[in-house]
Amino acid sequence: MSMTRTVVLSLLTIGGAACTSLPLQNRASELSTKATVSAPRLGVFRSDAAPTFKLNVNFNPQDLSLINSAVELVTIVKQTDGPSVVWIAFSPFENNSVVWTEAYSWYAATAKPSVGAVITPNSKTQASPQMSYTFAGGVFDAGTPDPILPKGTYKVTNNESTTPSMTFGLAQAATVNGGASVTNPVNTELVPAQQAETAVPQETILVFLRSGATPGLVLSASSASSASGASKLVVESAPIYLTFTSSITELTIQYDAASAQFNQ
């Protein structure tokens, strides 16, 4: 019998400045893995259309010089209930923009989602909500409509017979500073054979500076700088939490050296 693992990319609404200064280690409960057979929670935002979002990230010239000398990257992580993974990482200019559409792909990877690992998708397929996909023989099928799935829910079943488990998750494309569109993982889960993962993505992101960041890097639920097996020091600022909605499609943040974090 196939079992279902529900992974909710949960929504965190910004309530004020205090919320923007919480370090990653204080959000451990928000980033803990959840596996349940109950129906996944729905977020406050879901539209049949695929809206486009834009994040502007600005720096003062004097701050940027120090950041680049420390080889820190602007790092963006999507809020999840499972292991957090770096979605976007880039070396900044004074003024930067990140643009993405609310559209997702399923990916499968052989790398296990352990802290410090980099998840590189081995297979991908475009995904639609309320569709059930099956992975077998190293590829995804075309998917079939699943009316039982709640609106905005994505599902994949691992029927790969060559390994006891594989890593699955949703991936999302984005462009940075007008460059080429790149699709990277936004969440990651280890799914045993004959089990299924369901996910409900939401447009809440964490933005911070981090040295050594790379897309697909699995971060610790307690501290992004405590990667297993990492021997080098990781420099990291506190994150700011940002939520996009149907009425909030563009946000601008500015790095503040005095508080060592981004502010709106």
Image: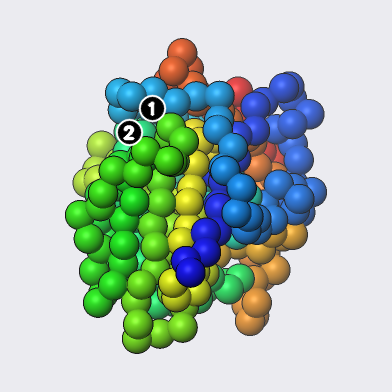
Instruction: Residue 60 in the image: state x and y as whole percent.
Output: 53, 31
The count of marks equals 2
The answer to whether residue 249 is above or below residue 69 is above
Q: Residue at x 50, y 36 (%)?
A: 202
Q: Residue at x 55, y 33 (%)?
A: 42
Instruction: Residue 144 in the image: state x and y as whole percent.
Output: 26, 49
Identify the secondary structure beneath mark 1. strand
Can residue 91 be seen at all in this image of the molecule? Answer: no
Amino acid at circle 1? Phe
Q: From this viewpoint, which residue is outermost toward the front? A: 1
Instruction: Residue 8 in the image: state x and y as whole percent.
Output: 56, 46
The answer to whether residue 245 is above or below residue 34 is above
Q: Residues within 10 Å of mark 1 (few under 14, many from 20)?
A: some
Report the side of 101 relative to 243 (left or right): left
The answer to whether residue 156 is above or below residue 179 is below
Amino acid at circle 2? Thr
Image quadrant where one finds the C terminus: top right
> Mark 2 vs mark 1: which is more N-terminal?
1
The answer to whether residue 139 is above or below residue 32 is below
Q: Which residue is mark 2?
A: 101
Cα distance, mark 2 to mark 1? Answer: 6 Å
Marks 2 and 1 in Cβ contact (< 8 Å): yes
Q: Residue at x 28, y 72 (%)?
A: 136
Which picture quadrant has residue 193?
bottom left
Q: Residue at x 74, y 31 (%)?
A: 19
Tell me, for residue 143, which label it has, or none: none
Residue nearer the viewer, 200 or 205: 200
Identify the secondary structure beneath mark 2. strand
Can residue 115 be seen at all in this image of the molecule? Answer: yes
Q: Which residue is mark 1?
A: 53
Q: Residues within 10 Å of mark 2 (few under 14, many from 20)?
A: some
Instruction: Residue 109 in the image: state x and y as whole percent.
Output: 38, 71
